[in-house]
Image (spheres, grey):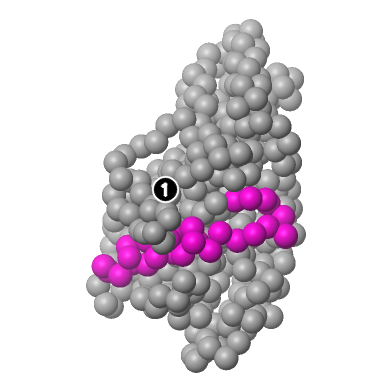
Amino acid sequence: MFMKRGALEELEENISRVYNVKKKIQEKGCHCLINISGHLSGSSMSFTGPSMGSVAGTARRAFEFGQTYVVKPKGKHQATIVWLHGLGDNGSRSVIRVAQTCLNLSEIGAIELQGDIGIFTPEIRVVGFEGQYAISKLDWSNLLETLPLPNIKWICPTAPQRPITLFGGFPSTAWFDVNDLSENAIDDDEGLDASAAYVASLLATEPPHIKLGVGGFSMGAATSLYSATCFVRGKYENGNQYPVNLSLAVGLSGWLPWAKTLSSKLEGVEGAVSRATSLPILLCHGKGDDVVPYKFGDKSSQKLRSCGFQDVTFKSYTALGHYTIPEEMDEICAWLTSKLGLEGKS
């Protein structure tokens, strides 16, 4: 699961595998267009949109954020949620869903086309389809727009392009640096602070009567949970005050930064108990996730509860890998409607 060779060497090997997949698909009488992007990988081969803002973490690093996609509410505006993509993606493109008819993908050696393609290998995106082979690309912004939640405004920003330590410094869009994907990983406090501050700046411009939330997928989920802990703590790790009041947080297929030290960071903080008790958090994770293991989601929910977060809902899905399914989206819609008291009128 972890990269043991040079990032470029592995990238070249996976590109070769992608084109072998394409060749085998075509041999079966199908046609496809394959685009390789660095989703959850060491590379980002395409980057949409100009820089829309920056946050200076310290004098050492300044983070340039990319294009932001906004899904406007179709009804009365009651809530705004910032939704964060996974590593290597952007605010629009994040989710891949595969529809399979007669063709057995295992026969052609496809690299797990059902969702994200491993955390450290390039994702195969088949954006055209014909005949037996049918694959559709679905963005987060488009998916969120289709949800029966007319009272929610969705803001989908794009993470900065930055070197990733785990990939030997190979660049990717990421909310923070990653040196490992394990329980012993070192948290990038500077990167987390910068991203959480950027998310808060997007929410701070909303009208005062609007309820505010954060959510995300994979690394985006981790950043959302970090934002939630900063809200409860009242400040970022760098000591700056957290400026907005969150009404909820959602994390899909992610993990909790600061898991080992969160309890001590919240200890003795004025108002932390009240904020933790009243903040609803929804976590969802698939038991078949081989990118961010299921145990990370389970342990994150347990840690949050042990630190005083009393309104934590954890949903598990037996056959779900590192992607999303309609059942999960239905759970999210029902939960958001309940927690935000949405009117539901378009």
Direction from residue 204 to residue 122 in the image, left or right: right
Magenta residue span:
178-206
Quadrant in which the N terminus appears: top right
Assign the C terminus to one quadrant of the image: bottom left
Q: Is residue 78 above or below residue 124?
A: below
Image location (x, y in percent) of residue 323: 60, 46
Residue at 55% in and 71% down: 281
Closer to the camera in the image, 296 or 174: 174
Would you say 104 lies left or right of 128 here? Answer: right
Q: Quadrant of residue 132?
A: top right
Is residue 133 or residue 83 the one in the foreground? Answer: 83
Task: Answer left or right for 8 relative to 333.
Answer: right
- Residue drawn 39% across the image and 59% down it: 59
Q: Within the magenta stretch, is there residue 189?
A: yes
Whether residue 14 can be seen here? no
Front one among 101 and 242: 242
Q: Is residue 210 magenta?
A: no
- Circle 1 is placed at which residue position? 160
The crowding category of the residue bearing disc 1, from other C-alpha atoms within 10 Å (few below 14, some 14 to 19, many at least 20), is: many
Q: For the residue labelled by badge 1, is the local secondary structure a helix, a strand or a loop?
A: loop
Query: Can you say whether 90 is above or below 235 in the image?
Result: above
Q: Out of 261 and 301, give the one closest to the viewer.
A: 261
Residue under the image location 49 percent in, 48 percent down: 174
Q: Quadrant of residue 273?
A: bottom right
Can you give x and y, in whole percent of width and height, for residue 258 in the image?
62, 68
| Residue positioned 51% across, 31% down in the render | 37
Whether 4 is drawn above or below 51: the answer is above
Residue 276 percent location from the top left of the image: 54, 82
Disc 1 residue type?
Pro
Residue 292 appears at what percent x and percent y? 67, 51
Q: Measured along the vertical axis of the image, is residue 47 above or below residue 277? A: above
Res 37 visible? yes
